[in-house]
Amino acid sequence: MAMGSFEEDELIRMVQDFMESESPSFTNSSPPNCHTLSHKTQYFTLQDVLRSESSTWEEAKVVRCVMKHMKSLRDAQNQKSISVMSNWLVKNLKRDGLHASLYQTSWATSLGCPAGEYEYIQVFINEDENNGKRVRLIVDIDFRSQFELARPTQYYREMTESLPLIFIGSDTKLCKIISILCSAAKQSLRQRGLHVPPWRTTSYMQSKWLSGCHHQHQEELDQNNGRKENHRVVVAPKDGAPGGGISKWIPPMVKPKRMDMAFAGSALTCQFSNEHKMFLKSSFGISQFWPN
């Protein structure tokens, strides 16, 4: 069920109040101090993407829950590491009835893209507009910092400052943001006379959130596959700790099976000898060499 205009305005206000409380709002239509037409076009394109995705009731619920918990964490001035806060947030989102879990991507080295891994939160929602089809939402509480550069140009700095501190959206929306920001980062680095590092390429940034090599929580594997599989182990949190530790899946050591050739040869020889013995007994009555 789609939200009405009032709910949409309320959702936008909530996102603005929390995400952009210390920086320019991402809904601000005023371009930065651009010097070229391409920069202005790029900036407005980014703003359109950030505002383009229409929200449903289910998505609005995710946004409200995330904002509520992160605001309580901020009000308590309980600043912990991103990993600890992510664990804590997942636990609270589950209490709200959401299908949330930590999600870790990992990818191998490829041409121009070094290996790496990244962790964020994913939430599955059912959209009535898509016949109840499950839709994945990415929740990254450390989103903006992933695009920061050393010695950025003024234009690129203003582009990154227009990003939300916390990203909540679909894979499609994220891909568009990555494409725009990586292009702007490339321009910024070249203007500074610097080469584009592999970890700022589009392929690397996409691998962070969209890599096919991933690990999931045990409970999600059980639900998807209908059986227990040890691809990932969730360690129970310590008393008082906001979340639990996670250990990666380690494949079991498989010992190759070896056939004992000496044993195999003995079996064949024994079988042949028995058959030969029976033949000699029946044909020539010879049995003194093979007692029964």
Image: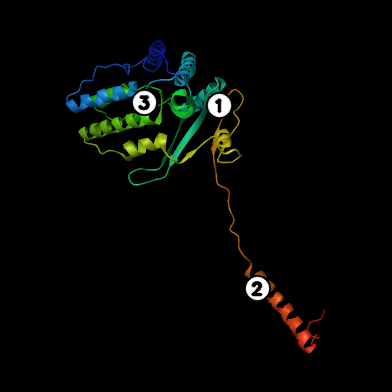
Q: Tell me where residue 25 appears, x and y as whole percent.
A: 32, 16
Which numbered dot is residue 275?
none
Disc 2: which residue: 265
- C-alpha separation, residue under disc 2 versus residue under disc 1: 59 Å
- The answer to whether residue 171 is seen in the rendering is yes
Query: Which dot, 2 or 1, sits closer to the camera?
Result: 2
Q: Residue at x 55, y 47 (%)?
A: 251
Disc 1: which residue: 243
Farthest-out residue, right = 292
Examine the rendered structure and indicate whether residue 88 appears above or below residue 224: above
Q: Taking 264 as reference, is 115 left or right?
A: left
Q: Tell me where residue 161 appears, x and y as whole percent.
A: 31, 22
Which numbered dot is residue 144?
3
- C-alpha separation, residue under disc 2 versus residue under disc 3: 68 Å
Name the amino acid type tagged 1.
Gly
Local SS, label 1:
loop
- The answer to whether residue 157 is seen in the rendering is no
Examine the rendered structure and indicate whether residue 286 appears above or below residue 236: below
Dot 1, crowdedness within 10 Å: few (<14), some or many (≥20)? many
Q: Earlier in the sequence, mark 2 or mark 3?
A: 3
Image-quadrant location for residue 155 = top left
